Amino acid sequence: MRSLKLSDFAMNDHLLALRLFARVARKGSFSAAGRELNIPQATASRMIAELERRIGATLLVRTTRAVLLTDQGADFLSRIETVLAELDEAEQAVRGTTELRGRLRIGIGSSLAVREIIPRLPEFLDRHQGLQIDMLLDDFRQDLVAEGIDVAFRFGPLTDSTATARTIGSWPRVIAASPRYLERAGVPRTPADLSSHSIIVGPVSTNPTWSFQKDGTTSSIRIEGRARIAGNEGAIAAAVAGLGIVMSSSGSLRHEFQEGKLMRILDDWDLGLMELSALFAAGRTTKRAARAFTEFLIEVLKDMP
């Protein structure tokens, strides 16, 4: 593909400028976005300046270290990404192709991504070689519209969400600790015993109360975390290191259980289920690639205990 000139843009490539702006905003770099679209950096900068002149607003703030969105730029980005995605979908539908192309932005928790998805990601991309993926690892809730996320995968209740959701599966909540910690601190025999133990508070266990059920009886324990760790992978690593007791899903901890790095505690008590859902932003046409990736995730997780 030949390099584009400013004159090409000036004549007829407003759409390309919009695509370029979206990539600059997401990459935070004119050079990185230009390489993706085969546009020289100087030309890319002039195209964005012309776009800003046309719409009468400053979209990006350029510093010596970064390219940042203005408030107007963030609002403009959230609107045009929807349009660009729908244009891509329309072109593929008209061509009658089943090939997935373009860029898919995925929001996903760290443990699910690192342990289950990334090891099999080459398999998905081999099936869809025209597709590019941005994977945002975040154990907390992202703003699907503001961050331009096509599909997010979240554990837990979605009562505060306006997004369209699809249930993927559910796994038991469990608590666990390392053999070294239990040898030092003792093994809890009842939920009440947890009050004298070191608790690791991760994203799965941010609720200060843990509720256990057994034989129709509920025992609720207020948790005072000795350590608060924002990522589930970090919380699990802290438990393996002997820092204390962690809560997670049975699937997330299965390798640690198999390898003897963690031991399940109070396994005769029920802590309830952790439900995983796929979320698609409300008011936006769902990309075929997002639906395909959701089906792939279901396939990957179907045998997870």
Image (tube, helix red, strand yellow):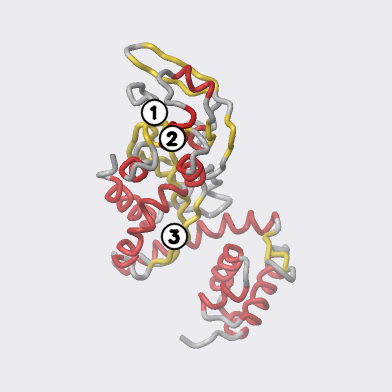
Q: Are marks 1 and 2 in contact (CB under 8 Å)?
A: yes
Q: Earlier in the sequence, mark 1 or mark 2?
A: 2
* Residue 200 vertical placement versus 94 (above, below): above
Circle 2: residue type? Ala
| Residue lying furthest bottom | 2
Left or right, residue 215 beside residue 207: left
Work out whether residue 305 or residue 151 is closer to the camera in this orientation and state it. 305
| Image mark for residue 265 | 1
Foreground label between 3 and 1: 1
Work out whether residue 186 or residue 140 is closer to the camera in this orientation and state it. 186
In x, y percent, where is residue 26?
57, 63
State the CA–CA distance, disc 1 to disc 2.
7 Å
Examine the image and state in which quarter residue 254 appears.
top left
| Image mark for residue 104 | 3
In x, y percent, where is residue 267?
34, 26
Examine the image and state in which quarter residue 251 appears.
top left
Q: Secondary structure at mark 1?
A: strand
| Residue lying furthest left | 303
Left or right, residue 251 beside residue 197: left
In x, y percent, where is residue 221?
50, 19
Foreground label between 2 and 3: 2
* Residue 181 vertical placement versus 3 (above, below): above
Circle 3: residue type? Leu
Left or right, residue 47 beside residue 175: right
The residue beneath circle 2 is 177
Q: Residue at x 50, y 56 (%)?
A: 82
Circle 1: residue type? Ile
Q: Are marks 2 and 3 in contact (CB under 8 Å)?
A: no
Q: Residue at x 53, y 59 (%)?
A: 81
